[in-house]
Image: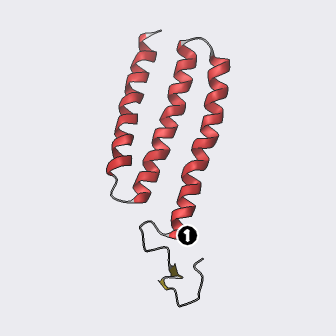
Amino acid sequence: MSGFLVTCMVLTAVLIAAGLFRVFAGPTVFDRLVAVAMVSVNGVIVLVLLGLAFERSDLFFDIALGFAMLAFLFPVVLGRYFERHGSTPGQGDEVGGRRAAAGEEPR
């Protein structure tokens, strides 16, 4: 394994640690979603670097591609969910920016 790959992996590990800190300490849900996306992208980079390091790029690149597709969908789906249902407990019962009337279903 070359020194360049080791340096890239260490740098990526530091970025993953910074992203995980933001996931757990994020002030809002949407900050946490961005951090999850960042950690996912860095995970794809780690898989590609491991493929290059072990000289098994065919296997690791396929795994990285599948993980990248899931990493793209996860924050998008969660963002849509929190956009519709509110990001904190008690916000999910609002309809169109106002409190829901009796018998009115939230969107």
Q: In which quarter of the image is residue 66?
A: top right
Q: On the rendered structure, is 57 left or right of 85?
A: right
- Location of residue 36 with respect to 54 vertically, above or below: below
| Residue found at x 51% / y 38% | 41
Q: How is the image coloured?
A: secondary structure
How many numbered markers are drawn? 1
Quadrant (top left, top right, bottom left, bottom right) of the C terminus? bottom right
> Residue flagged by tag 1: what amino acid is it?
Arg
| Residue found at x 49% / y 73% | 92
Dot 1: element: helix
Q: On the rendered structure, is 50 left or right of 7?
A: right
- Location of residue 6 with respect to 87 vertically, above or below: above
| Residue found at x 57% / y 42% | 71
Residue at the far front: name it.
103
Residue at the far bottom: name it.
102
Crowding near the residue tagged with mark 1, few <14, some 14–19, many ≥20 C-alpha atoms within 10 Å: some
Q: On the rendered structure, is 68 left or right of 6?
A: right
Q: Where is residue 53 in the image (x, y as percent from the top left)?
A: 53, 13
Q: Where is residue 21 in the image (x, y as percent from the top left)?
A: 33, 43
Q: Position of residue 76 (x, y in %)?
A: 57, 54
Q: Quadrant of residue 12?
A: top left
- Location of residue 96 with respect to 51 vertically, above or below: below
Q: Where is residue 19 in the image (x, y as percent from the top left)?
A: 39, 41
- Location of residue 38 with respect to 90 vertically, above or below: above
Of residues 93 and 25, the one drawn nearer to the viewer in this rendering:
93
Of residues 88 and 39, the one drawn nearer to the viewer in this rendering:
88
Q: In which quarter of the image is residue 57?
A: top right
| Residue found at x 40% / y 55% | 31
Q: Mark 1 points at which residue?
A: 84
